[in-house]
């Protein structure tokens, strides 16, 4: 079996290691934003659980992080987050390996774009399962771990992913519905962790993306293998020019810029930040809402 071709991510020189002692699960950590985020987390001292649907990719990324930032700093946990019982197993394995779970980052996602007249029920349900049901199940598993942890006052974080597409985007009815739904779920989870479960230091937030340069948004359609399924990803040639006109900063973001938002939400500077959306969109939101 050939070695997986990994995205080239430059090693980060740690400055303050502000995540030292923390353990973070991130889904979809093999490519794009997720890959940049696990690099940042590990460089800042965190133990990182790298999930990807492709076992070879999860293992290779975790291995690279271990070589760069210390043996044991990353653990691969490959598999499909939409599979029954998978998220609970991932949380259980994390706590067994590291003794604690501090943060979950629900980053895994793909788009199955189609206009409504061409939307198939299977495609709709797969999108909802990946972008809504899987994060719910991971949050539920994390909640149980936090409620039964030895230190109930330890700072915890749950980070969910939304997009400017939550406000509507041509050809993305399933993706838009899922991303809008996650905002309601995030807000409810933030309320329940404090008011119902009386957990004093759980911060629950969402990160909202505008156009980020990933394999889903590069120009040129191509089939990407996701597990056993080949999904067509990419945008038509010339699409970037039209997109950049809708961004106040006039460009698309690098995955590392998106990862910086995730770092803020799991880091110490967001300690009084909960039930909120952190928009990393270059001003796209302003134009969409206007």
Image: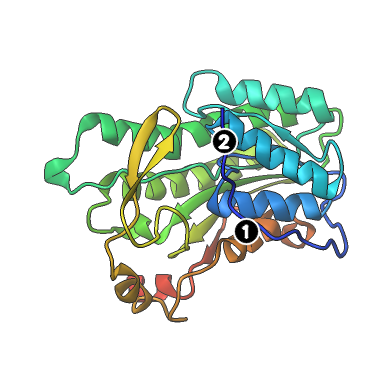
Q: Which residue is mark 2?
A: 52
Q: Earlier in the sequence, mark 2 or mark 1?
A: 2
Secondary element at image label 1: helix
Number of the front mark, 2 or 1: 2
Within 10 Å of disc 2 (Cα), the crowding (few <14, some 14-19, many 20+) is many
The answer to whether residue 51 shows anywhere in this view is no
Where residue 202 sits, quadrant-wise, is top right
Please state the horizontal and vertical placement of residue 277, each as a whole percent of the image.
Answer: 54, 59
Q: Which residue is mark 1?
A: 259
Q: Residue drawn 86% across and 33% down?
A: 151
Residue 181 lies left or right of residue 281; in this view the side is: left
Q: Residue drawn 86% across and 28% down?
A: 150
Secondary element at image label 2: loop
Residue 137 lies left or right of residue 234; in this view the side is: right
Please state the horizontal and vertical placement of residue 208, each as a whole percent of the image.
Answer: 49, 59
Q: Residue drawn 74% across and 51% down?
A: 41
């Amino acid at each position: 079996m050939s070695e997986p071709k990994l995205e080239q991510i430059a090693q980060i020189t740690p400055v303050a290691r502000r995540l030292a002692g923390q353990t973070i699960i991130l889904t979809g950590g093999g490519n794009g934003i997720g890959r940049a985020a696990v690099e940042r987390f590990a460089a800042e001292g965190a133990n990182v659980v790298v999930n990807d649907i492709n076992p070879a990719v999860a293992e290779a990324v975790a291995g690279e992080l271990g070589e760069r930032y210390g043996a044991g700093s990353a653990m691969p946990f490959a598999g499909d987050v939409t599979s029954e019982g998978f998220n609970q197993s991932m949380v259980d394995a994390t706590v067994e390996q590291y003794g604690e779970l501090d943060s979950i980052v629900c980053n895994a996602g793909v788009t199955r774009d189609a206009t409504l007249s061409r939307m198939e029920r299977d495609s709709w349900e797969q999108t909802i399962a990946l972008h809504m049901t899987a994060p719910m199940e991971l949050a539920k598993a994390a909640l149980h771990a936090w409620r039964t942890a030895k230190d109930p006052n330890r700072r915890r974080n749950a980070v969910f992913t939304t997009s400017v597409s939550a406000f509507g985007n041509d050809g993305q009815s399933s993706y838009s519905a899922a991303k809008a739904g996650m905002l309601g779920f995030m807000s409810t989870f933030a309320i329940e962790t404090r008011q119902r479960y009386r957990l004093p230091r759980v911060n629950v937030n969402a990160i909202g993306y505008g156009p980020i340069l990933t394999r889903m948004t590069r120009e040129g359609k191509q089939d990407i293998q996701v597990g056993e399924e080949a999904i067509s990803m990419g945008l038509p040639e010339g699409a970037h020019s039209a997109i950049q006109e809708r961004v106040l900063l006039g460009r698309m973001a690098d995955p590392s810029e998106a990862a910086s938002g995730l770092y803020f939400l799991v880091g110490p500077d967001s300690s009084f930040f909960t039930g909120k959306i952190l928009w990393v969109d270059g001003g796209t939101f302003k134009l969409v809402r206007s």
